[in-house]
Image (cartoon, rainbow, N blue to C red):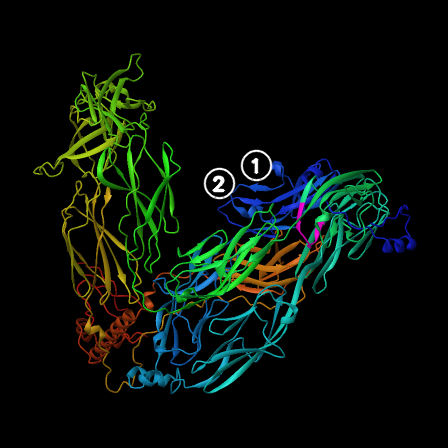
Amino acid sequence: MDRKRKWCVGGGAVLWVLLAHVAVALEVPLDPKVLEGLPQPPTITYQSPKDYIIDPRENININCEAKGQPHPSFSWTLNGTHFDVDKDPKVTMQPSSGSLVIDISDGDKGEAYEGVFQCTARNEHGTAVSSNVVVRQSRSPLWSKESNEPRIVQLGDSLILHCRPPVGLPPPIIFWMDPWFKRLPQNSRVSQALNGDMYFSNVLMEDSHSDYICYARFTHTQTIQQKQPITVRVLDMEAMNETVLASFINETDLFGDSPTGDRKPSFMVPPGTSSTFMVLKGETLQLECIAEGLPTPEISWSKDNGNFPEGRFLFKNYQKTLEVIKVTEADAGNYRCTAKNSKGLTHHVITVEVKAAPYWTGAPRNLILAPKESGVMTCLVGGNPKPTVTWSVNGVPIENAPNDTCREVKGDTIFLTDVRTGSSAVYQCNASNEFGYLMANAFVNVLSEPPRVLTPPNNVYQVITNSPALLHCASFGSPIPTITWFKEGQPSVLNGDPYVLHTNGTLEIHVAQPLHSGKYTCIAKNDLGSRENHVHLQVKEPTRILMQPEYKVVQRNRKAVFDCKVKHDPSLVPTMIWLKDDEDLPDDDRFVIGADSLSISDVTVADEGRYTCIMNTTLDQDSASATLTVVEAAPIVDEQPDPPADLELTDQLARSVQLTWIPGDEHNSQTQKFLIQYEDSRHDKGVWVNMTEVPGTKTTARLDLSPYVWYSFRVLALNGVGFSEPSAPSEQYRTSPSKPDDNPSDVQGFGTEPNNLVISWKKLTELQANGPALTILVSWKQKDVEQEWNNDAVDNNITEYVVSDTPTFVPYDIKVQATNLFGNAPEPEPVVGYSGEDFPSGAPASVKVEAGNDTIAEISWEPVPMATVNGRLKGYKVYYWREKSLLKEESQPEEVKVMIFSGNKTEGKLPGLHPFSLYNLQIKVFNGKGEGPQSATQTFETPEGVPGRPAFLTITPSLDSLILEWGPPEEDNGRLTGYTLQYQPVNNTSELGPMEEMNLAANETMVTLAKLKYSTRYKVYISANTIKGSGPTRTEEAATIIDEVLMRPPTVAVGTGPTEPPHPTSPPTQSPPLSPVFKGLPIGQPFRRVNSSVEENGAFITWEYSGPDNVYVEYNVENSKDAWTKEPVNGTQTHLIKGLKAGMTYRVRVVAKDHSDQTMHSTDELVITVPAMPNTQVDIATQGWFIGLMCAVALLILILLIVCFIKRNKGGKYPVKEKEDQHQDPEVQPMKEDDGTFGEYRKRTGDNSIYNSIPDATGKRESSSSSSCIMN
């Protein structure tokens, strides 16, 4: 490191010197022993990602960990304001770190904690800050309510089914399925676009479905939402021309005169012939082209003046999507997609522009400087557009920080000159452009530290002769220490041929030789002191293969052997590896690796190849190879091997002997193993017993022997054909007697009667006797009782001993030991056994039963005293049975059921009971012997339950009614209180209408549903009731009969002219909510990708933004002069506007303001329409049957009026006219009213009062009590 010792006075001369003599950064040591006690400013070691989307079901964890000396303290800001952790009981800070845990598990909403969090770690040497952590809660908004009209499309036309999912956080995954949750099949004709819409290049008749459903899966909340199904109807106009319906459609010119024919492709996405697309460096580029046409077009891609990046591109969605991962600047340019079919082709050119958020080309690094030293800190970043670099010191913008005459900032570089003690600090570099930002901490630590050697003392370095050797001397100190090396016995400094001293203190020997072995010393020295360290170098001999494997030609089924003898340094441990064709050997027992060879038995053609011997040590390796060729051999007849010969016993010991032999002829089949057998002439003469096996490559075996046996041995060889004849027996070998080695095994103690103890064991074999007069010594005594052991000796052939007159079920310690004339076997460990059990003498008491519900009863009882169990308590048996039904007196008792409760359990539940029944219950305790006496019988009743389904339901339809009959439920489960009858209409699309409900008496089994709609299907539900509620429902469907009279068209009178034929009027439909109108911002503005989705009373707005944090969402009613309503967004990039009125249209924009509330940036206005609340009721006035009925009624009324008018014109004589004829005065003649009718009398039946009379000439009315008017 070059150093300047002048104090900083400012000026150009100092800066020029600084540029010429810049201090090299001193790395911070990682050794914790060195760091202990070393002053150090804070360093952020772990923090949460910049964008943190929280799950509302989990606590919020925001990480912030830092190191420093002394350990730093932590604080937080939220949206630029101090966040007081101690005042919020929901927030806790982890000990020894700044990580926050916000508890929202009790249902608190996470929205309260949305915003921009930033952590600060500080100690007396500086302040480090974390990157901004934007906390946003994941959202899965509901789909906007809409009415999806059927999509009617002509055969061969293109079609787009829009999904338009709600805007979630993060965005949902879109997929299309049918109602049975099967994904819709996709191909080159039908595919899903990147935005989730489903595109049909041309439709077929098979595309007609009523169940195209778009699903949105929100990954954070693990929810899936479904759009209303979309109906698609494909019409074949050519086929429809032969029908009456086709004639009607052709007259209305709905689809034209002929079906759509073959046509050349045209692009549906993107439209037109060219478009532009911007992508950020490092992201994934996705370009999409979807074309329509008939036949289905094929899509291909190319790039103008270039090729696709190798290894980074792929085609998806049947060539319709081009994806390029890890985009670089070289990926910019024109991408051409071509759609082609038999009718022609078309092109679309997408111009891709690559921008870049800031990225590091040289992040700032920590500096450790001694007083009066100089240094440089740089912040090198790339980006497009070029990022702006700003500096802060200890979390404060550097222009607002206290002035430091030794610091000068030049863009992305800070120059430090002649630093002083106490000027340690943490610097923050922030680089940002419109697409993002980077922030990094780097400290300057001004220290005065004597040298420390970090390399462990007495390190041993081992190298192979003629290879390089590196001896390390890592050090730390401030100023940086100088390093010198010495070799033991040489006073001169080592720096020159063959030694090279590196700047980090490492000493290198390019070509190490044995004479360089020895002890080396390094010395680290600076102005404050010196420190030395010793290391050792060992130069080893290289590993060499002396006998290499040779080329082999071997006949098939024979054996191949490759030799590989190696010389290596005796102090190194070698490891031999064999490879076949540079791969591991096959996992086959035929391949056997020896100390210096590889053998392959029964070689096959598959074994041919190159075999490599590799000898590894910890420092080096050597290898050699040879080839194996397998050839066919003349036919060979395999036979059993000859028996081994010349058996010999050597190294004879008391308990072992070594047996050797000579193998016989293998007869063309390799020996696989040898079987050794023995004969015991003392105990079992003439019987040969298998003793052990050894591999076929060995001819010796060490045999373990037992005392007091007369051994003879023989050997058999086994090859692929079979075993050989046994060899001749060896000489007899007699072992000396000894005391037993083993005691009888499987010792147990149990009782067969209440007053005995049976002790049993497994007898020893003759080989285990080890000597003459083998007997068994049986010992017993009560456990935990102060008494002497009882003993008895029995013959080895006996395996059971009975102790009589024992207490009932008490524990005993038991020992069974072998003994012979030469002594006893080792003392055995006692085994615990129990004397015999008796039947329990006590019965459970205080039995309680409580019916928890209609099918389960809870029982409990007092346990019996353990003294009355008389054995090992196994549990309790509960006997219970149904005595009778409380509803049906003639019911018979049911079979007794048993439920067992193991151990000392004294409570439980009895499941599977019948409701409204009388039960009996008894309890018995049981042990290994059997059951004890029963408890007193308990009686309990189960309460009423819900009844079963009605036995049947039949429906008899008529014109406007349904006759229902049903049967009572087979399982009443209580007293029936009645029936609940429900019914509702079902339309042609299986949609259910409003539900009607009737409550019927318990004795009713028939009812008529009157005044129903004719020709309508109804769904009927009926269930029986008790006081506990309704039982299961029985459901049936039936339809009323069609009224053929009402279906006939009305008759038109001759001469009245043609009338409009009655046909159903299309019901008024509600227009779907308008999609938000969005005008995109040009690239380069702070706001990007603004989107919205509407709900019943609000709108959800999302955007991308890089800039100041004072962001608001403003909105007002479209075309109004009201002021904009402003809502802050708390540092997030999403906002939910609440309280909007249904059916209203609003203008919305997102703005960024400065501290004086002046708008700095703004998006274009979004126009959103809040959907009106849909009317879920069916408008009867729009129903076809109702319109037809009204037309018929109107026609009948018209006919009646015509008849009435004709009869009136005939001048029929009324009773009042006779009276008028008597008065010849014309003044008293009845006057014709203006409406063309005659004034008449009208009399209410049974009433003498006159309601209307004819006025006379004076305007007065005559009254009459005897005249009445008849109206025709």
User: Residue 504 at what x, y percent from top left?
Assistant: 76, 49
Q: Main secondary structure of the magenta part?
A: strand
SS assignment at label 1: loop
Find residue 763 and name its label: none
Q: Which residue is mark 2?
A: 106
Find residue 89 and name its label: 1
Specify whether residue 97 is painted magenta. Answer: no
Q: Amino acid at mark 1?
A: Pro
Identity of the residue furthest to the left in this view: 890
The magenta stretch is 461-470
* Front in this rendered view, residue 962 or 454: 454
**First of labels 1, 2 by sequence position:** 1
Q: Amino acid at mark 2?
A: Asp
User: Residue 1102 at what x, y percent from top left?
Assistant: 57, 59
Q: Are marks 1 and 2 in contact (CB under 8 Å)?
A: no
Specify whether residue 463 is painted magenta. Answer: yes
Judge whether 338 appears above or below 459 on screen.
below
Q: Name the residue at 53% across, 70% down.
A: 314
